Amino acid sequence: MYIQRAMRPVMRGTIGLAGAAALGYALLVEGRHWSANRHLPAPSAAARALLVLGCPPNADGSLGATQRWRVDLALRAWRPGDRVVFSGAALSGLPSEADVMAAYARRCGVPAAAIVCETRARSTWENMLFGADAVRDAPEVMIVSDPLHARRALRMLRRQDPAVATRVVRLPGYRFGEHPWRKTVSAVFESPLKPVVLWVHNRSRTHRGVTARL
């Protein structure tokens, strides 16, 4: 009985810390992602082009978890008649990022005729630089990645091709609490801590035999 009474303050403190951590996550991570996703105009009924930003596959060339998430985001927004542009080069002797993601999209029902693969881009800057050619004629454009990464990519597009940037609309289908670890990494990366995160990311990728690109 004495032990139970003694443990109650510890349990209350633990619950309090867990609650504070959850609140901090919601405000600092989900809040940033949600606001980044909401600042763009909502899409209309016009035909759209979805530009999916690349990231490396697994070390064996199979679909990576972040790649799967980005394609899933595109699948939520895609409608028959839309074009999906996958952007990403082949790195470290692996299949191109674009081809790996496109193969998954085809398995999920997107027809091959609706897919374009841009296989030169080796960075986010190049995703936008080369990808803009494939979406320039679309009435509306969606940049597909986590919201914070997509917002940084849009800033790049505004410098490269302002005319295309004015047609970028909001990516629908945002889900609170989805992929919390990946959202947390993105939130830290898109902050003053970026050099530290990039160093850790590169070390991890190098250890697993995959060249990093962000």
Image: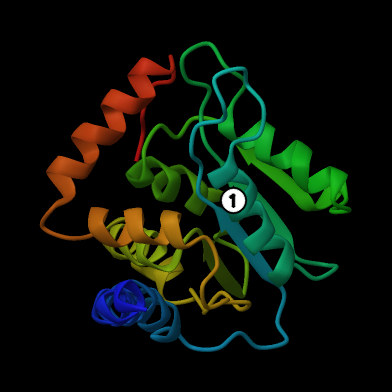
33 versus 96 height, above or below:
below
123 versus 110 height, above or below:
above
Could you say where residue 70 lies in the image, as x and y percent from the top left?
A: 58, 54
Residue displayed at 75% across by 47% down: 115
Q: Residues within 10 Å of mark 1 (few under 14, many from 20)?
A: some
Residue 16 shows in this picture: no
114 versus 98 height, above or below:
below
The part of the image, by quadrant, that contains residue 61 is top right
Amino acid carrying label 1: it is Ala
Residue displayed at 39% across by 76% down: 30
Residue 177 shows in this picture: yes
Could you say where residue 119 lies in the image, as x and y percent from the top left?
A: 56, 31
123 versus 141 height, above or below:
above
In the foreground, 117 or 10: 10
Residue of label 1: 134
Could you say where residue 111 lies in the image, as x and y percent from the top left?
A: 88, 50
Q: Quadrant of the N terminus?
A: bottom left
Could you say where residue 4 lies in the image, as x and y percent from the top left?
A: 36, 76
* Residue furthest top in the image: 93
Horizontal arrangement in the rendering, residue 130 relative to residue 124 (left or right)? right
Q: What colouring style does the render use?
A: rainbow
Horizontal arrangement in the rendering, residue 7 relative to residue 168 (left or right)? left
The part of the image, by quadrant, that contains residue 47 is bottom right
